[in-house]
Image (tube, helix red, strand yellow):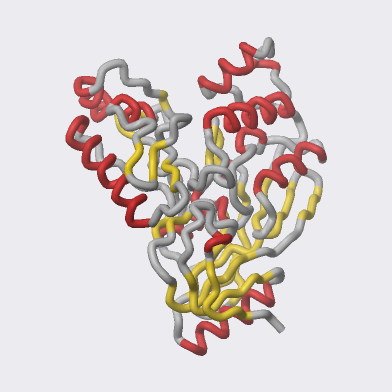
Amino acid sequence: MIDIKKDFSLKKSNSLAFDHRVEYYCDAETLEDCQEFIEFCLKKNIPINLLGEGTNIVLTKNIEGGVLKVSIPGRIKEENIVNFGAGENWNEIVLWSLENQLFGLENLALIPGTVGAAPVQNIGAYGEEISSRLISVEAINLQNNEPTYLNNKECKFGYRDSIFKREEEYLITSVKLELNEEPKTNTSYESLNHYLIKDDIDPEHATPFQVCRAVTSIRNKILPNYIEEPNVGSFFKNLNINEQNLNELNKRVSDLPYYKNADGLTYKVPVAFLIENAGWKGHQQGNVRVSKKHALVLIADKGATSDELLSLSSSIVEDIYMKTLVKLEIEPEVI
């Protein structure tokens, strides 16, 4: 029997610590628990909202209907194939994989959130994305409450995007990944490459453990801890543009940094540069501010509201568009 809480505060369930409430809340540790709560919501004809660790959402109001927090555990290893429960902490399974001599996730170390949330956002960092490792997900169809499977292609991955983000018809309950038994690493990302060199490590011969430590160190240095400074990590998506658009942007922005993507046709432009170049880094507006550590991170100080945060983000979006003709996209889910 699941425990359904009424009029539940979500303040401790989102990394911005916004104190909004929900009509019905359930913390589910099994697939069956999830189905029982989904059935409860379907019978009441109320919407179902999904929640992991709340590190990539911006709550703007009290939520009608139900919130289902997915806490399903599980770590199953069969040679180089691993299956993780959706409620597992992402960084913990990265470290667990390394301890079990399975490699390929080290570039994604210290990304906050759960395993189940990772495919939704198609999390990525330092030249890697989860989509390159994912075989399939087990999910529940929220329309009929039936278990189903989606393979990699059916997930329709894009840059920080997937079918789960666009259609919101599925609840992920477990994720199957294919990892490497041989310790081959990807150190092509510029800041990672430079960090390793400064640490007297040859990037071409760096071990997965060294890459993991380097990524962890870099992230700790440039990204504020949401427990101390409430935030959702990167608030805006980086740009992915073709060569023509890159050339046009280069004419409008001096010393623009960019990197060719693996497809050889598009380029990644760090939006943090555009925001910092426009003078927003460290900017305070009421109880919210742009981090002094990283211009992509917006921080909600004590007493901050979601209206203040979205007002700041809108001001940044409008200013960057006026100066560069680039329309920034918000990365977290706004609810």
Name the residue located 60 percent from the left edge and 23 percent from the top edge: 187
223 left or right of 90? left
**In the visual, does 223 lie left or right of 216?**
left
Could you tell me residue 188's position as x and y percent?
55, 22
Q: Residue at x 42, y 71 (%)?
A: 62
> Percent from the top left, x then y, of residue 306?
38, 56
Percent of width and height locating residue 105: 66, 38
Vertical side of 139 occupied by 134: above or below: above
Total numbered circles: 0
- Residue name at image x 67 percent, y 48 percent: 177
Front residue of 279 and 66: 279
Describe residue 76's horizontal placement relative to residue 259 as left or right: right
In the depicted structure, whether residue 330 falls above or below residue 72: above
Q: Nearer the viewer, residue 228 or 198?
A: 228
What percent of the width, then of the height, locates residue 61?
Answer: 39, 67
Please identify the quadrant where the N terminus is shown: bottom right
Q: Residue at x 52, y 78 (%)?
A: 7
Q: Residue furthest left?
A: 322
Up-down relation of residue 289 to residue 23 (above or below):
above
Picture quarter with the C terminus: bottom left
**Image quadrant in which you'd find residue 5:** bottom right
Compared across the picture, whether 157 is left or right of 317 comes to right
